[in-house]
Image (tube, rainbow, N blue to C red):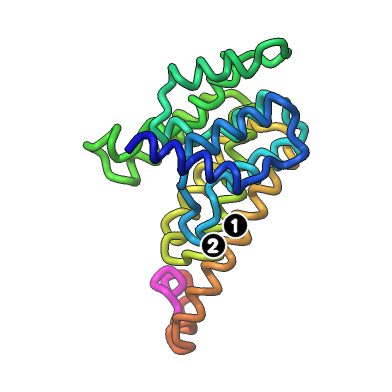
Amino acid sequence: MAAQRRKRQINLMDDLECPSGFNEPERKAWQFAVQAHGEQRRKYNQEPYVRHLERVAHTVMAYGGTTGMVMAALLHDVLEDTPVTEAELRTFLEEACQNTIVKPAEVLQLVLDLTDQFTKEQAPGYNRKRRKEMERQRIAQTSPRAQTIKLADIIDNTRDIIQHDISFAKVYIPEIVATLEVLRQAEPFKLYLLACYEVQTAVFKLEEDRRARTSPQEQDVPGPEELSNRPAG
């Protein structure tokens, strides 16, 4: 079974082409990510999962990210979503970064910072709201570089979710609005502004959807707060 899985992963790599803009260490990270994620696909359009990782990495590159940051962007989901262990990732990074200025320990730390520590499996005693609160508190303590990659991830996920899953967006978008509040150390600030723009655009789409599902009569009925603020007489 393991041999068959490796064969499928090799065939998958034959069907994918590494983007030409990546340098050698980044290409190695891309190859590792493709192998690690195997046949995983994005939920909504069924594209290979690596396409999401590429978009996150390209956003990091476009906003001045270092090679180490680009590598971390490509690898940011391997510990959370694949069987790869921290030890295995450390070994790979030490080999991939040989004879370069990239420090494998720093890349590993970025990936650890970007790995959700409060999943349902790791924090079974808490509901989703509390787990997300704890994760925000943790992310707030991460490095500016980790927060930069997190913003790139948020941008791509927000675009995907608001386009394909308006129902889940009603849960996801308010969580991300709160998360943005703790990512102000990210650099450059214009990337933070782009993330805010994408999330605010999603908020507007949610409001448009709500209005489309609400009858004109219901839209015109003032809420209790509006009524209480009206002048007497």
Q: Is residue 227 magenta?
A: yes
221 is higher (above) or lower (below) than 184: below
CB-based contact (under 8 Å), mark 2 and mark 1: yes
Find disc 2 in the rendering and name its residue: 162
Report helix, strand or loop for mark 1: helix
Report helix, strand or loop for mark 2: helix
Instruction: Report the magenta residues as a range.
Output: 222-228
Question: Mark 1: which amino acid?
Answer: Arg
> Where residue 206 sits: x, y (%)?
52, 67
45 is higher (above) or lower (below) than 176: below
Quadrant occupied by the N terminus = top left
* Mark 2: few/some/many CA within 10 Å (<14, 14-19, 20+): many
Q: Is residue 206 magenta?
A: no
Q: Which residue is at the front of the view, 19 or 120?
A: 19
Residue situated furthest left in the rendering: 125
Question: Mark 2: which amino acid?
Answer: Ile
> Where residue 88 sits: x, y (%)?
45, 20
Find disc 1 in the rendering and name its residue: 159
Quarter-wise, where is residue 17 in the image?
Answer: top right
4 is higher (above) or lower (below) than 203: above
Residue situated furthest bottom in the rendering: 217
Q: Residue at x 55, y 38 (%)?
A: 34
